[in-house]
Amino acid sequence: MASQPGIAVGARIRALRTERGLSLSALAAEAGIGKGSLSELETGRRNPTLDTLYALAGPLGVPLASLVDFRDGSVVADEGFRTVLLHTERTEETTSEVWLLQVGAGVTRSSPAHTRGVVEQLVVLAGSCRVTYAEESVDVPTGGHTAWPADVPHRYTATGDTDLRAINVIVTPT
């Protein structure tokens, strides 16, 4: 049985899919997930993973925060990875999301390409990480910062023996 947040996220995915005139089959194919899995998500019978949310956000053309209905405090987690939405700021030009990332030492978190023009920034609070995107790889120590175009596949790897704690800012053009 899905949790209440899972039910709310499923309803939001269904509403966005319907607004865009996409069939269940078309969205599932574009996101690279099973039609049955998408149906279970939409009806609240399955809780979404972070991988699934990222896979759906791109084809729906929305920031990740919109799938959790821009609720501050929303938590999305997978094994070794947890992120909390701290704040969302929306203007006519952009949607900016501020997330607290917690990544276990040695864990890699991969993300598919976001919609066109999305930029991410990372400020490392504790631990260190390697951010890889396109043909680039950047090591970011505690207190360090980096930014990159997130409309290409990218990944974070918590390097060293300490869990990574970082602030991730995602800016999506509207």
Image: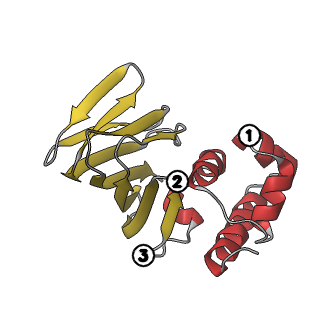
Residue under label 3: 73
- Residue 140 versus residue 91 in the image, above or below: above
Between residue 160 and residue 174, name the one nearer to us. Answer: 160
- Location of the N terminus by quadrant is bottom right
Measuring from the top left, give residue 10's x and y in whole percent. 71, 68
Instruction: Residue 117: name its quadrant.
Output: top left
Lower sequence index among marks 3 and 1:
1
Q: Given the image, on which type of amino acid does mark 1 rest? A: Glu
Question: What amino acid does circle 3 point to?
Answer: Gly
Which residue is at 25% across, 39% downward? 160
Report the side of 14 relative to 84 (left or right).
right
Q: Which residue is mark 2?
A: 79
Q: Nearer the viewer, residue 85 or 150?
A: 85
Residue name at image x 38 percent, y 39 percent: 156
Instruction: Give SS at disc 2.
Output: loop
Q: Nearer the viewer, mark 1 or mark 2?
A: 2
Q: Give the spatial CA distance, label 1 vs label 2.
A: 25 Å
Distance between the alpha carbons at the discs numbered 2 and 3: 19 Å
- How packed mark 3 is, by other alpha carbons closer than 10 Å (few <14, some 14-19, many 20 or more), is some
The colour scheme used to paint the residues is secondary structure
Element on which disc 1 rests? helix
**In the figure, 105 relative to 88: above or below?**
above
Give me the disc on residue 30. 1
